[in-house]
Image: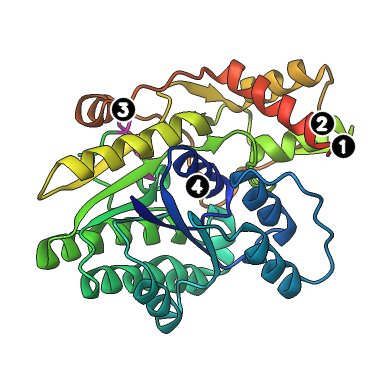
Amino acid sequence: MNYLVTGGSGFIGSHLVEHLLKNGHSVINIDNFDDFYDYKIKIKNTLESVGKTLEFSFHDKELDIQKLIFETSTKNHQLYYQDIRDKDGLEKIFSKHKIDLVIHLAALAGVRPSIERPLDYEEVNIKGTMNLWELAKDFKITKFIAASSSSVYGNNKKIPFSEDDAVEQPISPYAATKRCGEILGHVYHHLYHIDMIHLRFFTVYGPRQRPDLAIHKFTELISGNKEIPFYGDGNTARDYTYIDDIIEGIQKSISYLQTHEKVYEIINLGESEVIHLNEMVETIENQLEKKSYKNRLPMQAGDVHKTNANILKAKTLIGYQPTTHFQNGIKKFVEWFLRKGS
């Protein structure tokens, strides 16, 4: 199978590319190496995802990415330095390859930055996604998986969150763009018969996690004996989902799409295990064998109080079964963090 993966050099994307290649598939990876965080991280992700262990000397972003494209180009893997907002550039890629299924992970991520840059989030997460659907329509690609987010639930009072809950009151531009993606996706499913699954990811963590996300940031700061930004009283809670379980959920979604027709589904992918902020910090402290120094701050705008996934639909529809409990997942993450030498 030939898969097109957008955002394939990011955290989740690089793990997915690695998984697909190991299972004998071909991957077209589209990533724009956005300056949201250091492009060198994405270069390392890409090298790891294709099994490259060579030393990579960094000089200049544009030259380094071109070198990366050369180093990682094989019969089964092709990397494109491409922004999804550029429909003409995307069309050249779609014209060059026979694509069996699109897995769309690329996005401007993060709740707090979206409040500062709402128009950028609209351009990437809505317009960029629509460019992909337009090209899927034009090139007769009828299988599509899109990354949504638990953020669409906002401060939903019903716990755990279920796919049939009302989600029309998002509390950040990021969440709103993800909900718009789900709604617009249904339009393309209805009009053009594109079989589609939207996966609502619940706080994904693990090796290669983005450095701005709490688990990675806290691990780095605690390890370096620096203060961690600690928002609220520690009772906010998240349904943390280990990266291996997310990849399993994507793979099972792929299998479901390949064996079913007339599909439009929204599916939660979480661990269904709620961890409070206090417990999260304590678990990292235990693994690092260090105590944290907390800079106590008020809750930030756009942050939800609690997330908790009802994963019954994922279990019954696609056979999803997460296996990584939080304590074990943090152990694996910290081992990776210490190994990479940060």
Q: Is residue 324 visible?
A: yes
Of labels 4 and 1, the one closer to you: 4
Numbered label attached to residue 241: none
Numbered label attached to residue 310: 3
Q: Earlier in the sequence, mark 4 or mark 3?
A: 4
User: Please, what secondary structure does the residue beneath circle 2 have?
Assistant: helix
- Residue linked to disc 4: 17
Q: Is residue 192 magenta?
A: no
Q: Mainly helix, strand or loop, the magenta region?
A: loop
Q: Earlier in the sequence, mark 4 or mark 1?
A: 4
- Residue linked to disc 2: 222
- Residue linked to disc 1: 226
- Residue 259 or 314: which is nearer the viewer? 259
- Residue 275 or 260: which is nearer the viewer? 260
User: Please, what secondary structure does the residue beneath circle 1 have?
Assistant: loop
Which residue type does callout 1 highlight?
A: Lys
Which residue type does callout 3 highlight?
A: Asn
Residue at 35% across / 76% down in the picture? 95
| Number of other residues with Cα within 10 Å of mark 4, as a class: few under 14, some 14 to 19, many 20 or more | many
Range covered by the magenta-colored residues: 153-161
Residue 330, image x and y in percent?
A: 64, 23
In the picture as drawn, the residue positioned furthest to the front comes out as 75
Look at the numbered discs 2 and 1 and tell me whether their residues touch, using CB distance below 8 Å. Answer: yes
Q: Earlier in the sequence, mark 3 or mark 2?
A: 2
- Residue 34 or 340: which is nearer the viewer? 340
Residue 278, image x and y in percent?
A: 64, 23
6 relative position to 110: left or right:
left
Q: Does 274 appear above or below 52?
A: above
Residue at 52% across / 54% down in the picture? 8
Q: Does 203 appear above or below 45?
A: above
Q: Earlier in the sequence, mark 1 or mark 3?
A: 1
Residue 334, image x and y in percent?
A: 72, 26
